[in-house]
Image (tube, rainbow, N blue to C red):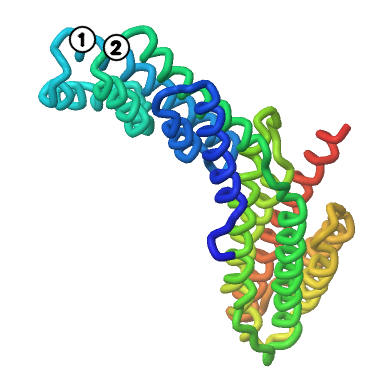
Amino acid sequence: MVGMGYRTIKTAIGAGLAIWIASLFDLEFATFAAIIVIMCIEKTKKRTLHSIRKKFFASLLSLLLGSICFELLGYHPIVLTLFILLFVPALIKLRIQEGFVTSMVVILHIYTVKEANLENLLNELYVIFIGIGIALLINSIMPSFTNEIKKYRTEIETKFSAILYQFSLLLNDSEHKWDGKEVIEVENILNQAKNIAIQDVENHLLRKENKDYYYLEMREDQLEILKQMVGIISIVSSSELDIKQRGMLAGIFLNISQHVDSGDTTIALKLVEEYEESIRETELPKTREEFEIRANLFYLNFEIKNYLIIKNNIFKRDRFSAK
């Protein structure tokens, strides 16, 4: 059914449950408990806790200050107007302005009954506690994003492999054409995956680290390097000069493309070392074009090392944290 998401179902159940419990205790304004549930249920546990905290303190403050104002100045519309004008800046100052709506509902209840006695004040507090309690209970049940994140990781690694393979083809064949669509596609996938990973982080209140989030940050850093390589590879591939290091770099890209999902960069780094040794043993370029191509190849080698180091660091951290 359209719009029937997990959050919608939880909100519906929580709202009904809150009214039912408040009604069992014969509380006035029992429907307000449902309003609190509806306004407090967020996408993640952490956001729910922040929302509840701000709404609770804002409601408590309005109950206290509003009752004093009405009891001293009377239950008149002008008093309510003055209270709101003074209360809103106070909420902003305390950084709990998100609780404005619930705090206004609370004080309007007192305004409606026109008596801020202990019974009415306790009634509002009980309703607030029921709404908050149900919101916490309902939002403690969160879906697992493990399979979704795994799916994104597979898609990202497939795209990275395709990009690196294309780099290898471009260096080996000056006639090869590539539109670079995989770069745009993987960037979109990374953004979607990070949104899911952030939700997963915020659903684990006691977890200090999230390996999936670090992994995605690593891939983002690597993608920036790949994007910088695209232009340089285009320049090199447009040249028909037969340079030994060009084929060696193509081999390095091919190797990396075949091991994107692996944390072991030993073979790739060894190929990079062989490439650097080849540079030291090769005669200096004889033409300007050869110099420019070899300079660009050297730059590509530098970026490949950065790419591999970023990957190596994240997998080392994962191994260390697992011990």
As drawn, the label of residue 55 is: none
Q: Secondary structure at mark 1?
A: helix
Q: Residue furthest left?
A: 78
In front: 121, or 164?
121
Q: How many marks?
A: 2
Answer left or right for 283 relative to 101.
Answer: right
Compared with 176, 78 (above or below) is above
* Quadrant in which residue 313 is drawn: top right
Q: Residue at the spot x=68%, y=70% of the render? A: 297
Residue labelled with disc 2: 116
Pick whichever, 255 or 278, lies toward us. 255
Residue 270: x and y in percent read: 87, 58
CB atoms at circles 2 and 1 under 8 Å apart? yes
Query: Viewed as shown, does residue 118 lie left or right of 248?
Result: left
Which quarter of the figure has residue 316?
A: top right
**Image quarter of the C terminus:** top right
Please say if 287 is above or below 275: below
Q: Earlier in the sequence, mark 2 or mark 1?
A: 1
Q: Residue at x 65, y 30 (%)?
A: 205
Residue nearest the viewer, comparing 28 with 69? 28
Question: Residue at label 1?
Answer: 71
Indicate the quadrant containing the N terminus: top left, top right, bottom left or bottom right.
Answer: bottom right
